[in-house]
Amino acid sequence: MKTTREIIAAFGGLEAVAKLTDTRPRTVEQWSRIGVPFKHFALFVARAKRRGIPGITYETLYAAKAASLRRKAAE
């Protein structure tokens, strides 16, 4: 997984991630541009492991967030 959008898709999309994180789909849509908030990293890693979703680690979440923020800064 290289992008936040791919990570969100791996968990089933905006609605599924909103339910997982107790947020709104619109909030999750914003994450696709700025990255998953750090406070949710542990939840994503644990749920990925439980669901057998490969490639979701603290490192990949951080790298995806950093890439998203670089793209946003370049706009």
Image: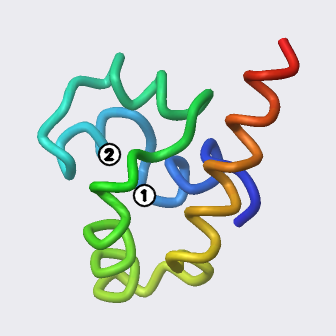
Q: Where, by quadrant of the figure, is residue 64 drawn?
A: bottom right
Q: Which residue is mark 1?
A: 11
Where residue 25 appears, x then y in whole percent? Answer: 31, 24
Residue 42 is labelled as none
On the rendered image, what quadrant is the C terminus found in? top right
Query: Left of 3 or right of it: where is 11?
Result: left
Q: Which residue does the image show at 40% across and 34% down from the upper left? A: 14
Q: How many marks?
A: 2
Q: Residue at x 55, y 42 (%)?
A: 35
In this rendering, position of residue 35 left or right of residue 25: right
> Dot 2 corresponds to which residue?
17
Q: Is residue 4 left or right of residue 63?
A: left
User: Of all residues shown, which one is farthest toward the right?
Assistant: 74
Q: What type is the residue that disc 2 sits on?
A: Val
Picture coordinates of residue 67, whole percent (x, y): 76, 46
Instruction: Report the coloring of the rendering.
Output: rainbow
Please, what secondary structure does the residue beneath circle 2 have? helix
Q: Residue at x 20, y 52 (%)?
A: 20
Q: Which residue shows up at 53% across the image and 59% down it?
A: 10
Residue 40, quarter of the rendered image? bottom left
Q: Quadrant of the N terminus?
A: bottom right
| Image position, residue 29 (x, y; %) | 47, 24
